[in-house]
Each structure stands twice: as C-alpha cells, then as structure tokens.
Image (spheres, rainbow, N blue to C red):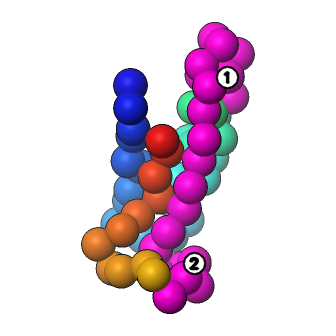
Amino acid sequence: MSGLLIAAPSSGSGKTTITFGLLRALKRRGVTVNAGKAGPDYIDPRSTPSRRAVLA
C-alpha cells in the first residue's frame, strides 16, 4: 500500500483515533509507516481545502 486517505465530513468524527489505530496495527505487522496531516484545522500556508489527513 502506498497511501491511504482518511477523511470525514466534520471534526470529532474519530479520524485521529482511526489513524492511530491503523498506524499501530501496521507497525506491529512490520510495516514502515509515516503519517501526515493537512487541512483547515491545521495552520499551514501550503494547505488547501482539498487536502485532508493523509497516511503515507
């Protein structure tokens, strides 16, 4: 798997919980994982409304 996008229509939907669970499960299986986050709730001048939480 080269990437996974996790998105939801609003905050408080559990995106962070799901992301951390997936990261931990993949790491326990020996997969090298990296996580990144971008979006309206993250102040990043390079961010656009079309970008969301990304698990690479």
Residue bearing mark 1: 27
- What secondary structure characterizes most of the magenta part? loop
Name above or below for residue 45 compared with residue 47: below
Tell me which amino acid carries mark 2: Tyr
Quadrant position of residue 25? top right
Measured as percent of width and height from the top left, residue 31 is found at: 60, 19
Numbered disc 1: secondary structure: helix
Per the rendered image, the range of residues in magenta is 24-45
Q: Is residue 6 left or right of residue 23?
A: left
Q: Could you tell me residue 37's position as x and y percent? A: 54, 62
Residue 40 placement (x, y as % from top left):
46, 81
Residue type highlighted by circle 1: Lys
Left or right position of 37 against 25: left
Instruction: Report the residue that reaches farthest toward the top.
Output: 29
Residue 32 in magenta stretch: yes
- Label 2 belongs to which residue? 42
Q: Residue at x 45, y 81 (%)?
A: 46
Q: Using the image, determine if residue 28 lies above or below residue 43.
A: above
Q: Any mark on residue 56, and which? A: none
| Residue drawn at (38%, 56%) of the image | 7
Which image quarter is the N terminus in? Answer: top left
Lower sequence index among marks 1 and 2: 1
Q: CA distance from mark 1 to mark 2?
A: 25 Å
Q: Position of residue 22 (x, y in %)?
A: 57, 32
Locate residue 32: give its quadrant: top right
Q: Label 2: few (<14), some or many (≥20) within 10 Å?
A: few
Q: Is residue 7 above or below residue 29?
A: below
Q: Is residue 41 at least partly visible in the picture?
A: yes
As displayed, is residue 28 above or below residue 4?
above
User: Of helix, strand and loop, which one carries label 2?
Assistant: loop
